[in-house]
Amino acid sequence: MKTTRSLAALAVTLALLSCSKKPSGPTREEVLPALQQEAQTMKTEAEKMDPKLQVTNTWTIAGVEVQEQAGNKAEPFKGTIRFDIETRTKEWDGTVLADKKQKSFNYAYVAKTKKWMMRP
């Protein structure tokens, strides 16, 4: 009877300990908003153009993705920001030239600084 009680108590203790462990480091959900903010900042800065140039850039955020890098404690996540870019240029004769392209930027989340850093 004592052995059964001891085993039951041990099982309950181990179950509680395994449930109470918090994962070390941030989660994907915790680092994603910082990368989304980086995308918004890039968009805002890229769309600033001198009106005298008669060029407008429209950067549309096409996607912000975060992937876990298992086993990499220094950079536990990698991310990609994708943009659809439309450039419109007004020519001297009044015609407007439009150009569309896609661009992506790669990032890594640095655990030590808790920030996203651009990577090649």
Image (cartoon, helix red, strand yellow):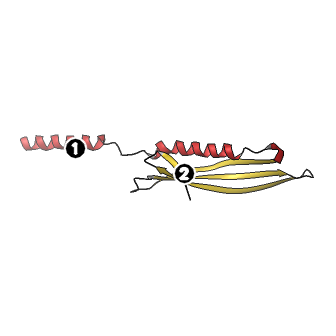
Q: Is residue 64 something one can see in this rendering?
A: yes
Q: Amino acid at mark 1?
A: Leu
Q: Residue at x 91, y 50 (%)?
A: 94
Please give the label number shown on residue 98: none
Question: Residue lying furthest right in this view?
Answer: 93
**Which element is circle 1 on?**
helix
Rendering coords of residue 99 (x, y %): 77, 56
Q: Residue at x 22, y 44 (%)?
A: 14
Rendering coords of residue 8 (x, y %): 16, 42
**Which element is circle 2 on?**
strand
Please give the label number shown on residue 65: 2
Q: Residues within 10 Å of mark 1 (few under 14, many from 20)?
A: few
Q: Amino acid at mark 2?
A: Glu
Give whichever of 119, 21 is nearer the camera: 119
In this view, the mark in front (2 or 1): 2
Q: Quadrant of the C terminus?
A: bottom right
Residue 3 sits in quarter = top left
Q: Is residue 1 something one can see in this rendering?
A: no
Question: Residue lying furthest bottom in this view?
Answer: 120
Rendering coords of residue 30 (x, y %): 47, 42
Q: Residue at x 30, y 42 (%)?
A: 19
Residue 1 sits in quarter = top left
Left or right: 3 in relation to 111? left
Rendering coords of residue 63 (x, y %): 60, 50
Q: Earlier in the sequence, mark 2 or mark 1?
A: 1
Left or right: 34 in relation to 25? right
Left or right: 80 in relation to 87? left
Mark 2 to mark 1: distance in Å?
Answer: 36 Å
User: Are discs 2 and 1 less than 8 Å apart at CB?
Assistant: no
Please give the label number shown on residue 14: 1
Q: Residues within 10 Å of mark 2 (few under 14, many from 20)?
A: some
